[in-house]
Amino acid sequence: MNIDLRSDTVTKPTKGMLQAIIKAPTGDDVYKEDPTVNQLERRFAEMFGMDTALFFPTGSMSNQTAIKLHTQPGDQLICDKWAHVYNYEAGGVAFNSGVTCNLIDGHRGMITASAIEKGISPISNYHTPNTTLVCLENTTNKGGGACYDFEEFKKVRTLCDSFGLGLHLDGARLMNALVAKNEDPNSYGKIFDTISVCLSKGLGTPLGTILLGSNELMARAIRVRKILGGAMRQVGFMAAAGLYALDHHFERLAEDHQKASEIAQTLQKLDYIKKVEPADTNIVIFNLIDEMSKDQFMKDMSENHIQISDMGQGKLRMVTHLDYTDEMHHIVLNVLKNYEY
């Protein structure tokens, strides 16, 4: 039995999801004639209380589109130093939008309004890039699935309004945050100008991300999506997977969170573990003690048919997900408890 805890992107469609895919009515989405895509977009727009939603093949393309909507070449966006848009999107902010990033040293991938304010370039100073956008991430990937306090979002919104800045949320794992903190998605629509929500992580679809925003912004987003190569045809098959996931995989995210918490609690008791980040959702990040070899540990886990991720800087990661069963969970906990170094 292979136990893959590298990411929640490794899941396969369930039988029910496959049936939904097969039976989906489709059309040409470039002409906006795919009924299943249109249904998914309407459902997300209603869910988040925003004007319009647009289906993208990937989260990176969705984020890159949002950045393009809010900026001009030579502008600057503000984000945490661990932000996905900076670390894991292949320099797209520079390549696609000609934008630089002002990186804030936050806490577990989260940044405060006061820290953001210090990073805003004064518009009167023509020597520095013009700050036009703030990008936040919830939950945070490199921050170990940490969730923002919603009150901080409100403070950031007020700040952005006072400086005329756009506010984008990279919500790759936003659905996890909604479940973990019992939040209303509609409240997010009142805070952010654009929101990206991934379907292929905790929700377990083969692909897909939704970008949400105002009618004005999203009228431009469909053109940017085309430029980036994201216009698709009978993509209703994948939109059907998203609709199925909303109905069947959303609330169950709490199960992933519970398993991640149990892994973290187990790691904290082991003498070969130096540090474990709080496991707020489905991500567990930990460090081994200095005298242990990270490469050897990962090799030993692999020999026990357990795959995990190396996040760099000594950090290792496990991510629980839809395909991580109770049986697998029992095996992982036993392997960790009985590991000899």
Image (cartoon, rainbow, N blue to C red):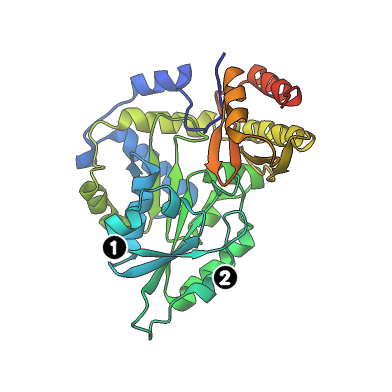
Classify residue 265 as left or right of residue 84. Answer: right
The residue where tag 2 is placed is 115
Residue 245 position, x and y percent, is: 48, 31
Residue 266 rendering spot, x and y as whole percentages? 75, 32
Task: State the residue in front, 105 or 341.
Answer: 341
Q: Quadrant of the C terminus?
A: top right
Q: Residue at x 50, y 73 (%)?
A: 119
The residue at the far front in this view is 291
- Residue placed at 38% from the left, 68% from the top? 76
Q: Which mark is residue 303?
A: none
Question: Which of the pair 169/42 is nearer the observer?
Answer: 169
Q: Quadrant of residue 208?
A: top left
Q: Earlier in the sequence, mark 1 or mark 2?
A: 1
Which residue carries the number 1 mark?
98
Label 2 residue SS: helix
Residue 169: horizontal and vertical position, in percent? 47, 55
Label 2 CA crowd tier, 10 Å (few <14, some 14–19, many 20+): some
Residue 325, percent from left and from top: 62, 20
| Front residue of this view, candidates 132 and 3 | 3
Hey, what amino acid is under mark 1?
Gly
197 relative position to 328: left or right: left
Instruction: Look at the image and tell me whether residue 215 can be seen.
Output: no
Quadrant location of residue 128?
bottom left
Q: Nearer the viewer, residue 108 or 301?
A: 301
For residue 86, above or below residue 13: below
